[in-house]
Image: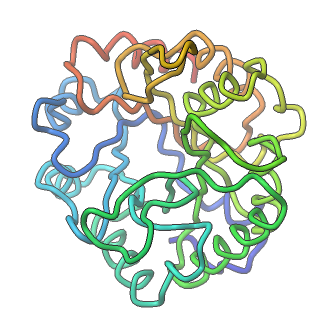
Amino acid sequence: MYGSSSAPFAERVALLSRLGLGISTEFGARHGGLDLLALRRGRPELVEFLEIGADLDRGVDRDALAWVEAGWPTTYHFLDANLEERESLTDEYLDATREQAASVNAAWLCGDAGLWHIGPRERGHGVLMPPILCAESAREMAANVRHVRARTGYEVLPENPPAHLYLGDLHLLDYFARVADGADSGLLLDVAHLAIYQRVAGHGPLDGLDGYPLERVVEIHVAGGTEFASGGRVFVDDDHSPAPLADTWKILEAVLPRARNLRALVFECERNGVEDVLPVFERLRGML
């Protein structure tokens, strides 16, 4: 937590910790995936913090709790908050989320900004859908980010989500620029998700970045993706494989020098072998 939620972003971001290079996880990722604790102990210069993906239904798994017990830094990535839908953000939900984030000593809250569930928040209703890219939706999300920040006491970083179809007349980067301005918030820029969007929308990898407030980017995500063909078109599966696309690297190289308030860079690779992901961690370390 960082103090008054009504303080300007420039004052709030100055109080946020510089976490460096980190890795993400979510409930049960260890099964067939990385041993987070072994990676941290073996290469602490590459894995400085853990982003814990969690929802209230499943809670936090043993590996993440062991990380917390070791006293290492964390952030809290929600997997069940509909930032586009105020009805989803009840006081009961937000209070419980704040308690869960506090229990792991999270530096801030973040998460894909759209819809994580349709209808009631219940097991089996989970789905990740992007927001409608229009001015009305951006205003609604901005108000919701302010509300979550005020209720929880945490900085809230909305993340651009992945999808193969987006509705609305705004460019994805313009949409989140409006959200950040309306909420006076920081942003989580997922460059792998952006690469997917740019391809789906028929844009070049760097299109739209000139109008995007990179000074508000507090966290960046990098992840691998796998191309697949369907209906005569080529799409990208956001599968967190160990090989980021060339467009993902191109976007990252363009934004890093301009993200002056960057506090954290996450490589999302939780279900791969250690030897497969170390080269990417080492490349990212060299870029910071």
Quadrant location of residue 228? top left
Q: Position of residue 193 (x, y in %)?
A: 57, 33
- Kindly give the residue lying farthest to the bottom in the view shown: 91
Q: Height in image: 163 above or below 81?
A: above
Q: Position of residue 2 (x, y in %)?
A: 56, 70
Quadrant location of residue 163? top right
Q: Position of residue 63 (x, y in %)?
A: 14, 48
For the image, the number of numbered tags is: 0
What residue is shown at x 50% (from left), y 22% (from top)?
236
- Left or right: where 57 falls relative to 99: left
Give the color scheme: rainbow, by chain, secondary structure or one colour: rainbow
Between 218 and 115, the one lying in front of the other is 115
What residue is shown at x 58% (from left), y 44% (from top)?
219
Q: Height in image: 63 above or below 115?
A: above
- Left or right: where 115 falls relative to 15: left
What residue is shown at x 84% (from left), y 32% (from top)?
208
- Kindly give the residue lying farthest to the right in the view shown: 211
Q: Position of residue 200 (x, y in %)?
A: 66, 26
- Left or right: where 115 falls relative to 106: right
What residue is shown at x 58% (from left), y 67% (from top)?
83
Between 260 and 98, the one lying in front of the other is 98
- Kindly give the residue lying farthest to the front in the view shown: 231
Quadrant location of residue 252? top right
Image quarter where the C terminus lies is: top right
Q: Height in image: 169 above or below 223?
A: below
